[in-house]
C-alpha cells in the first residue's frame, strides 16, 4: 500500500516576478533561503546538488524549470534516500508583488516511515520546515532591494 501526502505553503512578496525569479531560478538565490548552503552549479533539469541545513544533508536533482514561473526537484535526506520527495516552487504575479507557492509531495517519506510516525506527523514536520524556509525568504527580501 502506497501512502501519499503533500504540503503546500504560500507567501506574498512585495517584489516583481523577475526579482522573485532570482530567488528560485538561480542557485545563488535558492542558497539564500532553502538551507544554510547549496552546492548547485545551475538550476537546470538534470543538475544534481547538495543542500546543507544544520546537521541535515540533502541531495537534490532539478527535474523541471519553467523560466520565470516554476522549478521542480526531487530531494532526499542523505541518511534516508528511500524517503525522497518531490518539490515544486511556483511564482504567481499579483497586484502588490509575487506569490511564492511551495508544494512538497511526501510519497516516498510517507511510505517508508509509516512504521515510525503517522502521516500527520510527517506532514506536520514538513509544514514547519517550509514555514521556516519561507520566512527566511521573506527576511532575505526585507534586507535587500531584490531577493538575491
Image: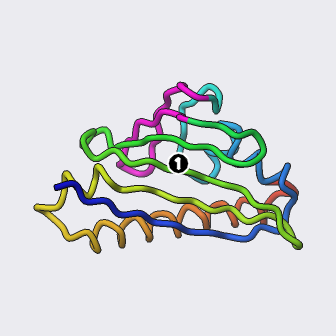
Q: Position of residue 80 (x, y in %)?
A: 24, 43
Q: Is residue 92 magenta?
A: no
Left or right: where 48 falls relative to 82:
right
Most common SS among magenta residues: strand
Residue that lies at the very extreme toward the left in this rendered image: 115
Q: Position of residue 102 (x, y in %)?
A: 57, 59
Q: Secondary structure at mark 1?
A: loop
* Residue 120 against residue 102 in the figure, above or below: below
- How many marks are shown on the rendered structure? 1
Q: Is residue 50 magenta?
A: yes
Crowd around label 1: few <14 · some 14–19 · many ≥20 (10 Å): few
* Residue 89 against residue 138 in the figure, above or below: above
Res 2 quadrant in image: bottom left
Who's the residue at 16% across and 61% down the image? 114
* Residue 119 against residue 69 in the figure, above or below: below
Left or right: where 32 falls relative to 75:
right
Q: Please give the range of residues in magenta.
A: 45-63
Who's the residue at 85% across and 67% down the image? 97
Residue that lies at the very extreme toward the front in this rendered image: 1
Colour scheme of the picture: rainbow
Who's the residue at 58% across and 29% down the image? 45
Left or right: where 63 falls relative to 24:
left
Res 1 quadrant in image: bottom left
Residue marked by disc 1: 36
Q: Position of residue 138 (x, y in %)?
A: 70, 66
Q: Position of residue 103 (x, y in %)?
A: 52, 59
Res 30 quadrant in image: top right
Amino acid at each position: 500500500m502506497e501512502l501519499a501526502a503533500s504540503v503546500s505553503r504560500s507567501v506574498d512578496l512585495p517584489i516583481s516576478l523577475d526579482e522573485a525569479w532570482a530567488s528560485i531560478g538561480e542557485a545563488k538565490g535558492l542558497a539564500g533561503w532553502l538551507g544554510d548552503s547549496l552546492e548547485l552549479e545551475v538550476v537546470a533539469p538534470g543538475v544534481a546538488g547538495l543542500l546543507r541545513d544544520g546537521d541535515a544533508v540533502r541531495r537534490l536533482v532539478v527535474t523541471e524549470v519553467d523560466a520565470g514561473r516554476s522549478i521542480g526537484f526531487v530531494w532526499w535526506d542523505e541518511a534516508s534516500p528511500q524517503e525522497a520527495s518531490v518539490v515544486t516552487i511556483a511564482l504567481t504575479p499579483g497586484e502588490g508583488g509575487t506569490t511564492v507557492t511551495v508544494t512538497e509531495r511526501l510519497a516516498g517519506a510517507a511510505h517508508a516511515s509509516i512504521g515510525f510516525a503517522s502521516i500527520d506527523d510527517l506532514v506536520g514536520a514538513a509544514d514547519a520546515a517550509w514555514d521556516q524556509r519561507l520566512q527566511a525568504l521573506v527576511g532575505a527580501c526585507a534586507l535587500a532591494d531584490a531577493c538575491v
